[in-house]
Image (cartoon, rainbow, N blue to C red):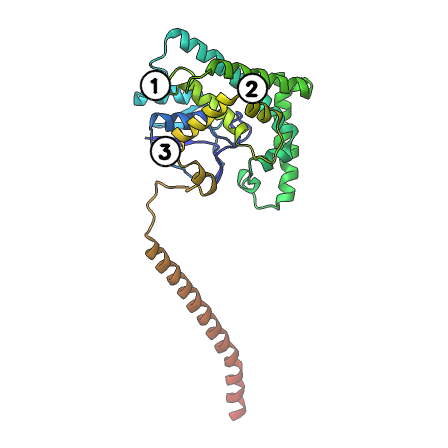
Amino acid sequence: MIRAVTGVLPGRVSTDPSPGTFPGIPGCLISQKTSGTKTHNVDHKVKHRSKKGQLPFVELNGEEIADSSFIIKELGKKFGKDLDATLTNEQKNNSHALISMIENHFLWVMLWWKTKNPDDFVKGYKLNLQTILNSKMPIALLNIFFKFSYCRKGAKKAKAQGIGVHTPEEIIDFGKNDLKVLTDVLGEKPYFFGNDPTTLDVVVFANLAQLYFLDSEIKNPLREYLNESCANLVGHVNRMKERCFPDWDDICTNLDLNSHLPKPPPEEKDKAKEGEKKAEKEAENGKEKSEKESEKEPEDKEKEKDAK
């Protein structure tokens, strides 16, 4: 039995895969989609994390596995669906180097941008803070809390990692250089190593999707560079989206949670609702009746007293 817990939010796909910081579209989920492994959307209220404090993580036959890279590796072994099985040693080495660049450099550039632009971060990904923070407090208060708690923590992490100590112009240049490397390596190929996606394609999509699908009204210099100078990467993102998430538009607007659980037919649902309304009405009528009777009792007693 396998149970996967990711940070993907109800009603949203493209948010943020930063480790231990914000919910997102994890590489392991894309890997499962790419390899054809069946998945379900389970509403876990964004409460659960691994023993390492990370999302995503999976439980495979009772054993917990955290971090997308380990998850992809272990699930590949378990189900015989290694995305890199056809790669040569040289290609595997190149893949490892590029994945390290994305996860240990480009990802932090994106994290820096989000923590420095919290309003754009929330609006650009249409984040529901009440869902993320599991709170019913007013949105205005949650916005303040989000800025001074989550975003401040993210900014401290970016500074500790090294990215955050540079000027905004220098950090954006770092991101552009990473995109330039990826666009040069991809060239005119549909995927980085040929006609089929590998782990590198999964990691690239997981990170570039959150840049490419950022709300069009939000300004981001890296998104502008991606659209203007990296047409092949834009094509790659859309190919991966169509291949892994053919129902993308539907799940972005109407994500069906707990889809693995059986649901009653519409007629039964309507009957159940009618039954509930009827029971509520009967309960209200009974309450009114008992109140009237209780009001009558003192009057009856007074009449009996007068008669005597």
Toward the bottom, the furthest residue is: 307
Q: Position of residue 171 (x, y in %)?
A: 64, 19
Q: Which residue: 57% across, 40% down?
A: 129
**For this rendering, which residue is in front, 269 or 54?**
269
User: Label 3's element?
Assistant: loop
**Upstream in sequence: badge 2 or badge 1:** 1
Quarter-wise, where is residue 96 in the image? Answer: top left
| Residue 163: quadrant of the picture | top right
In the rendered image, residue 66, in percent from the top left (x then y), is placed at: 44, 24
Q: Residue furthest top?
A: 90
Task: Note whether residue 174 is visible.
Answer: yes
The residue indicated by pointer 1 is: 82
Q: Earlier in the sequence, mark 3 or mark 1?
A: 3
For label 1, count other residues whose C-alpha is less than 10 Å away and answer few (under 14), some (14-19) or many (20+). Answer: some
Q: Residues within 10 Å of mark 2 (few under 14, many from 20)?
A: many
Q: Tell me how far mark 3 sits from mark 2, CA to CA.
A: 28 Å
Q: From the viewer's perspective, is residue 251 above or below residue 89?
A: below
- Residue 39 relative to residue 100: left or right: left
Q: Is residue 175 above or below residue 285?
A: above
Earlier in the chain: of badge 3 and badge 2, it is: 3
Q: Residue at x 41, y 42 (%)?
A: 256
Q: Which residue is mark 3?
A: 39
Image x and y of residue 202, in percent: 43, 22
| Amino acid residing under circle 1 | Asp
Residue 106: which numbered mark, if any?
2
